[in-house]
């Protein structure tokens, strides 16, 4: 280990690519909590707005030039990351998502305790020979992870079914309830320039996520005509950017607004009557948790990860089969036409998030994993495989 005589606190190095979307938000929240808890935190990621945000939180953000997907430049990217690791001299490396998990594990090769957090498995996003190669890598690369951290039990089960070995922990995603909180719809809409002319009485559906096949906005657009058939004045907002933006815009009616990438998603949840996430696959999506924390009801696809984010009482109304525009349209229209039910579901969802998905719980559980890897032990429930139970949030990872 590399603690100095003057600063005995262990150093954690997070490695992250992509620099946007849910994984980047998870890293940001985790870094914020870890800095507040007194850890020495470094992050390796491509130069981006994420770098600026992490430095503002007090993290040591190091530039790591790397593309979003694996490619011919991988060997150079691994060498660059190895130089960052040599400069930082971390005690724990925590690699997030497929690309950083690939480069990070190759660069370290088990010489430093390494946590790999897939945030949805790489082989779920592709098909054919690419899927086979990704699965082969995940099986092989698991030997270089001292711990694989999954954000849902379903994600862990998918890895086990795929033949991926290793020691597992399940730490559900957490969000900051101080940032994502209920607010008056009319006040919030008045403060969002892109919603000018949409008053508080207009039924508003919001979908937050990268515009890509995974998030299923194309399914929502196919469902939208049927929604308008029952709720003619409804409006839909797609918040986010991504490779499918042009294709989605080409098929969207005038009642659909493309808000683009935004820095404050909380305001968009607060402006919504209903939040929809029609994903085809997820690790554990942040959008439903953030929306529920804002007191807004959600409709999500019945896929691993998304399903697990909901309390049992909401599943009958809020889960729909994936890739089923008719079922999605029916669930959305039913809720838009029932404001009392929306209010009840929103209250239940917020209570669920406050009880089980506070980011401080996720940070404490992650600290418990680090303690184990650095030889600090921990509660018996934290050993071996399975879910890591939260410990005291501000506890040092060497206490």
Image (cartoon, rainbow, N blue to C red):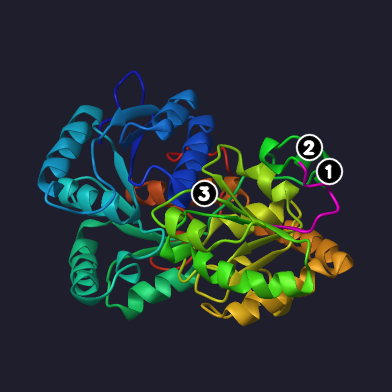
Q: Report the number of numbered marks.
A: 3
Q: Quadrant of the N terminus?
A: top left
For the residues labelled 2 and 3, say whether their Cβ atoms are less than 8 Å apart. Answer: no
Q: Neighbour class for label 1 at 10 Å: few (<14), some, many (≥20)?
A: some
**Which x, y percent locates residue 117?**
37, 56
- How far apart in space, not on screen, are marks 2 and 3 (Cα)? 20 Å
* Chief secondary structure of the magenta portion: loop
- How far apart in space, not on screen, are marks 1 and 3 (Cα)? 22 Å
Q: Residue at x 56, y 76 (%)?
A: 302
**Mark found first going from the N terminus, 1 or 3:** 1
For the residues labelled 2 and 1, say whether their Cβ atoms are less than 8 Å apart. Answer: yes
Task: Kindly indicate the quadrant of the structure image that contains residue 253.
Answer: bottom right
The mark found on residue 399 in the picture is: none
Q: Which residues are magenta?
A: 197-205
**Which x, y percent locates residue 251?**
52, 64
Farthest residue to the top: give it. Answer: 6
Residue 19 visible somewhere in the drawing: yes
Left or right: where 302 falls relative to 141: right
Quickly name the residue at label 3. Answer: 240
Quickly name the residue at label 2. Answer: 190
**Which x, y percent locates residue 342?**
81, 65
Q: Neighbour class for label 2 at 10 Å: few (<14), some, many (≥20)?
A: some
For the residues labelled 1 and 3, say whether their Cβ atoms are less than 8 Å apart. Answer: no
Look at the numbered disc 3 and give the secondary structure of its residue. loop
Quickly name the residue at label 1. Answer: 186
Look at the numbered disc 2 and give the secondary structure of its residue. helix
Indicate whether residue 283 is drawn in magenta: no
- How far apart in space, not on screen, are marks 2 and 1 (Cα)? 6 Å
**Mark found first going from the N terminus, 2 or 3:** 2
**Which x, y percent locates residue 54?**
44, 30
Q: Neighbour class for label 3 at 10 Å: few (<14), some, many (≥20)?
A: many
């Amino acid at each position: 280990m590399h603690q100095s005589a003057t600063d005995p606190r262990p150093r954690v190095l997070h490695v992250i690519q992509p620099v946007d979307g849910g994984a980047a938000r998870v890293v940001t929240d985790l870094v914020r909590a870890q800095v507040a808890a007194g850890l020495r935190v470094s992050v390796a990621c491509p130069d981006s707005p994420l770098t600026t945000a992490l430095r503002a939180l007090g993290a040591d953000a190091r530039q790591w030039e790397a593309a979003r997907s694996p490619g011919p430049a991988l060997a150079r990217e691994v060498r660059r990351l190895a130089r960052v690791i040599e400069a930082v001299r971390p005690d724990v490396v925590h690699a997030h998502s497929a690309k950083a998990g690939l480069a990070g594990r190759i660069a370290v090769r088990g010489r430093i305790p390494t946590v790999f957090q897939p945030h949805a498995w790489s082989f779920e996003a592709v098909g054919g020979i690419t899927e086979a190669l990704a699965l082969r890598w995940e099986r092989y690369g698991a030997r270089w992870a001292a711990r694989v951290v999954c954000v849902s039990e379903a994600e862990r089960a998918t890895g086990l079914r795929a033949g991926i070995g290793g020691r597992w922990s399940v730490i559900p995603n957490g969000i900051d309830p101080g940032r994502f909180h209920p607010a008056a719809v009319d006040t919030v809409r008045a403060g969002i320039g892109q919603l000018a002319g949409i008053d508080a009485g207009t039924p508003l559906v919001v979908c937050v996520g990268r515009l890509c096949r995974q998030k299923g906005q194309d399914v929502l657009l196919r469902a939208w005509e049927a929604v308008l058939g029952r709720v003619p004045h409804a409006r839909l907002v797609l918040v986010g950017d991504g490779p499918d933006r042009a294709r989605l815009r080409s098929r969207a009616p005038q009642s659909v607004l493309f808000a683009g990438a935004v820095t404050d998603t909380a305001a968009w949840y607060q402006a919504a009557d209903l939040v929809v996430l029609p994903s085809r696959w997820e690790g554990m999506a942040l959008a439903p948790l953030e929306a529920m924390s804002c007191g807004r009801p959600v409709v999500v696809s019945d896929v691993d990860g998304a399903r697990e984010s909901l309390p049992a009482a909401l599943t009958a109304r809020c889960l729909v089969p994936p890739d089923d525009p008719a079922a999605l349209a029916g669930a959305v229209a039913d809720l838009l036409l029932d404001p009392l039910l929306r209010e009840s579901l929103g209250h239940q969802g917020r209570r669920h998030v406050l009880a089980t998905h506070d980011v401080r719980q996720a940070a404490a559980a992650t600290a418990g994993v680090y303690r184990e890897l650095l030889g600090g032990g921990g509660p018996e429930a934290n050993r071996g495989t399975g879910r890591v139970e939260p410990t005291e949030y501000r506890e040092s990872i060497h206490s």
